[in-house]
Amino acid sequence: MTRKAYIGVIFLVCCALMLQLGCGKSKPSRFYILSPLPPEEAPSSRQDVSIGIGPVEFPDYLLRPQIVTQTNANQLDYAEYDRWAEPLNENFARVLADNLTHLIPTDRVHLYPWLGTLEVHYQLLIEVIRFDQGEDDQITLTVLWGLLDAPKREQILQRRSSFSRPAPAADTTGYAGIAAAMSELVGEFSREVAQALQSIRRQ
C-alpha cells in the first residue's frame, strides 16, 4: 500500500469514528400523551345511552409526531425532540371517549369505526380546526362538531366551539405543561358535548 493510500484509509477510519461519536451524543426524544379528566365520584346509576365518536378529522399539519407551535401567522415550529407518543387524532378521540364515559355517565362509548352489530343512539362527528399553541402564547382548541340521531341518520345539532388558555412558562414545565393544558381543553370540550347530549335527551 502506498503512503497516499494509507493516509486515505486512516482518514476514512477517523471520519467513521467521528460519526459514531456524534450519533452517540444525539439529544434523546421525549414523548407525551393527552390525559383524561381526573376521576370524580361516580353517580349511583349509569345511563342507558350509546354514543359513537367519529370520524374525528384533524388538519394535516397536526398529524405529525412532533408537537407543533405557531411562531407567527404563517410559520410553524415542530419540536424535533418533543413528540406525541401516538397520533394526536387517535389520542384526542380516546381521551374524549374516556371523559364522556364518566361525564354522562355511560359504559357504551364507541370509537369509529365500531362494529355494525353495536347499537349506537348518537353519533358525534368532529372536525378539529385548530389545536396548538399560537404566537400569542395561548393554547387553542377550535372544533366544528355535530350530533346525529344515529338510527334515523338525522343531524340534531351542529356547533363550532373554541377553548383557550394561557400557555405555561417555557422555563418551568416546557412541553409537558403544553400537553397538560391541551388535555384540559379536551376536558372542556368533553363537558360541552356531555351537556348538549343530556339536554337533547331531556327534550
Image (cartoon, grey):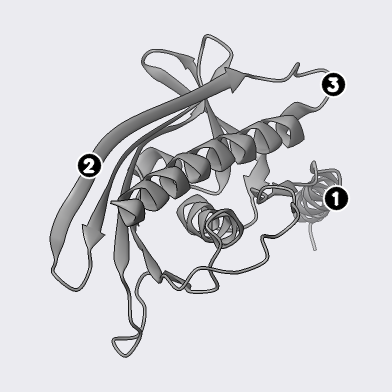
Circle 1: element type: helix
Q: Which residue is mark 2?
A: 158
Q: Inspect the image, locate mark 3, and give the three-letter code of the amino acid beneath it.
A: Thr
| Mark in the foreground, 3 or 2 | 2
Choose the circle earlier in sequence order: 2 or 1: 1
Q: Which residue is mark 3?
A: 172
Circle 2: element type: strand
Q: Residue 27 occupies which quadrant of the picture?
A: top right
Q: Which residue is mark 1?
A: 24
Instruction: Give the crowd class for mark 3: few <14, some 14-19, many >=20 residues within 10 Å.
Output: few
- Mark 3–mark 2 Cα distance, whole angstroms, equals 39 Å
- Mark 1–mark 3 Cα distance, whole angstroms, equals 28 Å
- Quadrant where the image shows the N terminus: bottom right
**Location of residue 149 with respect to 176 vertically, above or below:** below
Choose the circle earlier in sequence order: 1 or 3: 1
- Mark 2–mark 1 Cα distance, whole angstroms, equals 52 Å
Q: Residue at x 48, y 57 (%)?
A: 93
Q: Inspect the image, locate mark 1, and give the three-letter code of the amino acid beneath it.
A: Gly
Q: Is residue 151 left or right of residue 51?
A: left
The answer to whether mark 2 and mark 1 are in CB contact below 8 A is no
Q: Is residue 138 left or right of residue 141?
A: right
Q: Residue at x 19, y 74 (%)?
A: 151
- In percent of width and height, residue 33 lies at 66, 50
**Location of residue 140 with respect to 19 vertically, above or below:** above
| Mark in the foreground, 1 or 3 | 3
Circle 3: element type: loop
Q: Is residue 8 left or right of residue 89?
A: right
